[in-house]
Amino acid sequence: MNEKEYIESIPMWAKKKNSLSEVRKNIEILGIKLPKVIHVAGTNGKGSVCAYLSNILIKNHIKVGTFISPHLIEVNERILLDMTPISDRELESISKYVREKLGNSDTSPTYFEYIFYIATVFFSKTNPDYVILETGMGGRLDVTNVFEDTLSIITSIGMDHMQFLGNSIKEIAYEKAGIIKHNSTVIFDDSNEEANEIIREFAKAKAAKIIPLSDFDYESLKFTYVKYKKKAAALAILGAGQLLNTIDNIDEALTKTVWHGRMEEIEKDIIIDGAHNEPAIIEFTENAMKLAKVNNKKIKLLISVVKDKEVEKIFDIITSKLEVKKYYLTAMNSYRSNSTDELYNSLNILLEKNKRQSKISCYNSSIEAFNEAKKEKADDEILFCVGSLYLMGEILEGNR
C-alpha cells in the first residue's frame, strides 16, 4: 500500500474525536511551527475566500501556504504552496514522517486531521510568509483551531451539518465564531442578523477588532456576475488590507482565480456548481435563472445529493424556483451517496407540490449521467450539474 492508498484508508469519522489539547500534543511531536496564520470558517464560501486571498497575496509577492477541503480529484489539492498542489513525492515523504512520529500516539487521527498534519509539516518545511487554514467543519473544536491566528475570516452562515453544530443559526454561528482569538482581528459576513449578533458578542469577549463585510461595496466588483463569488472576493480584499500596507493587482488576482466546481463553465453551456446545502442551493437557483434568462436558454439539471443533506429541502427550493426541462438523477461513487430511488421519489413529490412538469432519468454512474446529458443537450439549453462537491470531482475527473 502506497501513502496515498494509506491516506484514503483512514476513516473519515472516529468514534472519539481528538480534543484540541491532543492535537496540540501531536503538533509538538511533529515539530510544527507555522508563520502568521489566517483562519477561515463559515458555512459557504470558505474555499473561495482562501483562493482569492491566496492569489491577491501571491500577486503582491507574498509566499503563501493554503490548506483547504475537500479535494475534487486528488488529495494533493488540499495542500497548496502559492496555489500549486503539494507534489506526490513531498506528500509521500511527509506522510511517512507523520506515521512514524505518531505511531505510538494514543489517539489515531481521523482522515481530515491526518491531512492537516501533513499540510502543517509541509508549511513548516517550506516556510511561507502566511498560512491560510480553512476549517473542516465548525471552528471552535475543529483541528485547525490550534494556532494563534493573525486574522480570522468568517463567511456566510447557514443551516448545514446540524447533527454536529446545532439546529439554529445562533448555535452554528457560536461554533464558527470559536476561531476568534484574543486581541485579534475578525472579518465577517454580517448579512445574517442572528449570526452577526453572536460573532460581535464573541469578538467583544475576546477584545477582537471587527470588520464587517457591509463596510465593502462588493456589488461594485465587476469580475463575475455570481453574488457569492463577489462576497468571497470582498472578504479576501478586506483580509489583504489587514495584512499588507498597500495592495496591488487586485483585479488581475480576482480575474485569474479559478476555483473548480463553483459556478464553473467546463464546456460551452455546461456549468458545474458544488452547492450542497440550503443557502448555497438558493444562491445557485438565482444564478441559474439569471444565466438562463440572459442567454434565453432552457435549463437541464444533473443532480445528486449525499445522504446527510436535506434532500427534500433542496428539491423544494429547486422545483419552486426553476423551470427545469429534464432532470438527470445519479448515484455517486461514495458511501455517502443517496440511491437514485430515494432521489426520484423525493423529486417527484416536490415537482407535484410546486406544480412543475419535468422529464426524469436515473443513472447509477455520474459519468454515464453526464455523458448522456451532454449528448442530449441542445443549443438552446444550459446543463447545470449541482448538489455535491463529490459529484463535481467525479465529473471533472471523467471529463479530463
Image (cartoon, rainbow, N blue to C red):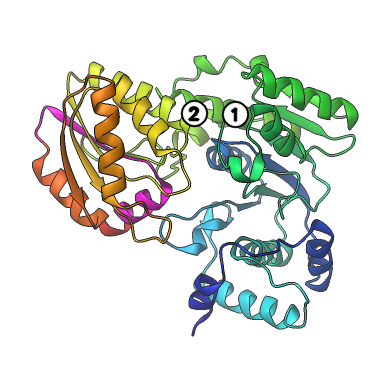
Q: Which residue sits at x=57%, y=30%?
A: 158
Residue 348 drawn at (x, y percent): 24, 34
- Number of other residues with Cα within 10 Å of mark 1, as a class: few under 14, some 14 to 19, many 20 or more: many
Magenta residues span 378-396
Q: Is residue 106 above or below residue 43?
A: below
Q: Which is more toward the observer, 313 or 257?
A: 313
Q: Is residue 380 magenta?
A: yes
Q: CA distance from mark 1 to mark 2?
A: 9 Å
Residue 221 drawn at (x, y percent): 50, 20
Q: Is residue 246 above or below residue 368?
A: above
Label 1 sits on a secondary structure element that is loop
Residue 355 drawn at (x, y percent): 22, 19
Q: Which residue is mark 1?
A: 156
Q: Which residue sits at x=76%, y=38%?
A: 151
Residue 168 drawn at (x, y percent): 64, 29
Q: Nearer the viewer, mark 1 or mark 2?
A: 2
- Number of other residues with Cα within 10 Å of mark 2, as a class: few under 14, some 14 to 19, many 20 or more: some
Label 2 sits on a secondary structure element that is helix
Q: Which residue sits at x=64%, y=28%?
A: 169
- Displayed quadrant of residue 328: top left
Q: Which residue sits at x=72%, y=39%?
A: 175
Q: Which mark is residue 251?
A: none
Tell me which amino acid carries mark 2. Pro
Tell me which amino acid carries mark 1. Ser
Q: Which residue is mark 2?
A: 279
Q: Which is more toward the observer, 306 or 102?
A: 306
Q: Is residue 193 above or below residue 119?
A: above
Is residue 95 in view from this perspective? yes
Q: Is residue 274 magenta?
A: no
Lower position in the chain sequence, tag 1 or tag 2: 1
